[in-house]
Amino acid sequence: MARLGKDSLNFFQLETSIVFDPRIRKLMRKHGTVGFSAYVFVSALASYENGYYVDHNDLLEENLSEDLGVDETTVRAIIEYMCQLDLFDLCTWEKHKVLTSASAQSAWKRHLSKRQKAKLEDIKLAYSLVEQIEVSMRV
């Protein structure tokens, strides 16, 4: 197994109240525990590989399919539904085939700011969603 690089996390935040999130409940109603497992798998992989995003490609679908015991068509449907529910950003997924979220990006920026002793506003991210949010919150 590959070792953690400097651009990855060895953890990701999973709130205990996640099972009460209406988006997660919708995901589970439609895709059961496989849908929830896919969400956790993709979130963990994003944290592990790049800190806050993962490329959606054939290998991701193959791995999810094998690990979750479902076919790749089901995996694609689950990923698309997670994006429709805004668990991952739909626009970024459609445009770049990347799965990311504002919450993952915020956590990554906090991690980097502590590690590099940098200001949050000085940290720039590829596929950034959080700069848009931070700017609108200041207005």
Image (tube, rainbow, N blue to C red):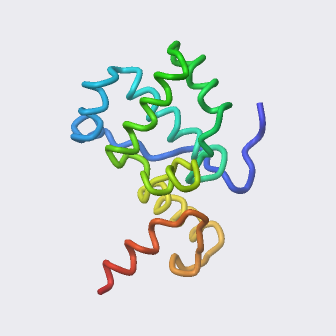
Which residue sits at x=55%, y=22%?
A: 72
Look at the picture and state if 118 lies above or below 78: below
Q: Position of residue 96 (x, y in %)?
A: 58, 54
Which residue sits at x=42%, y=51%?
A: 90
Look at the picture and state if 136 lies above or below 99: below
Total count of labels: 0
Q: Is residue 108 left or right of residue 78?
A: right
Q: Residue furthest bottom?
A: 139
Q: Quadrant of residue 82?
A: top left
Which residue sits at x=36%, y=20%?
A: 33
Q: Position of residue 45 (x, y in %)?
A: 59, 39
Q: Position of residue 92 (x, y in %)?
A: 50, 56
Which residue sits at x=63%, y=66%?
A: 115
Q: Nearer the viewer, residue 79 or 20?
A: 79
Q: Residue furthest right?
A: 2
Quadrant (top left/top right/bottom left/bottom right) for the N terminus: top right
Q: Is residue 76 left or right of residue 118?
A: left
Q: Nearer the viewer, residue 18 or 70?
A: 70
Q: Quadrant of residue 117?
A: bottom right
Q: Is residue 113 left or right of residue 102?
A: right
Quadrant (top left/top right/bottom left/bottom right) for the C terminus: bottom left
Q: Position of residue 99 (x, y in %)?
A: 52, 47
Q: Quadrant of residue 78?
A: top left
